[in-house]
Image (cartoon, rainbow, N blue to C red):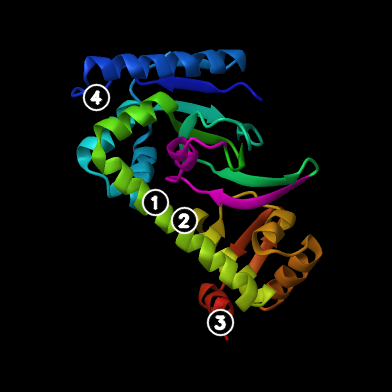
Amino acid sequence: MCPAHIERSGLQPETAAATSTQHAFTGFATLSSRLDSLGITRHAGRGPQLLLPDESRVVEAGAWFASLPRELHDAILSLALVSYARHGQRLLRQGAPAEEWLCVVRGSIRLCHSASKRRQVVATFAPPGTWIGDTELADGGPMMHDAYAQGDTKLLSISRADFQMLRQRYADLDEALLRLQCARLRSMIERVADMHALSLAQRMAKQLLRLEHAFGVDVSRGPSIALQVSQSELGELVGASRQRINSVLKQFEREGMVRLAQSAVQIVAHDVLQARAAPN
């Protein structure tokens, strides 16, 4: 793993009891030991103060996080580590014990499922504002995915001990996590249904629109997807080979819907692409 730079909130929420503080310190010590073994450095400081204004807005504007009570919202941020990961750096390992709750601040996380030792399939790309790892921390099971930084990535991290302390102290958190799981389940069911009900061209158009919504940035001739993603990875997202994805994207380009570049797609005709994604 490439070295990363990590900074830690030095204070517990003002309302935390002494026993909770000791619990959180124990969790930090465990996490610190693991980080030291990886050659990762840490510095003290509050999580919120270590985010740029636009980064804070991204985290706080996430639909799920914005729905939290203010006291819980502030408690989570006060416990956060801030870390930096280089492109391709492994953040979580499938099958390993869950140790951290992560939030993407800048960049992205590529979640992959290892079907075998030689085969990994991209499950999704987590955009800024997305939280990862709460499922495994809540149920005590191992990590379901490998997670890699997609592009240079900035993260917030909550240790296992702090996550459990938050659950014990704030009853609202479990209900909020249930809502988050429901949203993920709805998305998963929709994707499974799309595999059976939509053509490859429709699935590809819909996936590009999802990526535009999550990673889109405005440029002179239309929104561009600010994410380095290969055609093989796009194929894994929609259940098709790289060759078939290349054919569909070339057709979209000929029809004036997208402009292709190396590991990048610019959407030129959003409305046309949206119409192509609609069920027949």
Circle on res. 13: 4
Circle on res. 180: 1
Secondary element type, mark 4: loop
User: In this figure, which residue is indicated by the disc labeled 2?
Assistant: 184
Point out the tag, 2 or 3, that comes first from the N-terminus: 2
Q: Nearer the viewer, residue 76 or 257?
A: 76
Q: Nearer the viewer, residue 221 or 189?
A: 189
Task: Give the residue type at disc 2.
Answer: Arg
Give the CA distance from mark 1 to mark 3. Answer: 27 Å
Residue 11 seen from this side: no
Picture coordinates of residue 208, whole percent (x, y): 58, 64
Secondary element type, mark 1: helix
The part of the chain drawn in magenta is 119-142
Name the residue: 22% across, 22% down. Answer: 16
Name the residue: 52% across, 21% down. Answer: 5
Task: Give the residue type at disc 3.
Answer: Pro
Secondary element type, mark 2: helix
Give the CA distance from mark 4 to mark 3. Answer: 49 Å
Secondary element type, mark 3: loop
Give the CA distance from mark 1 to mark 2. Answer: 6 Å
Point out the tag, 4 or 1, that comes first from the N-terminus: 4
- What is the quadrant of residue 239 in the picture? bottom right
- What is the quadrant of residue 276 in the picture? bottom right
Residue 190 seen from this side: yes
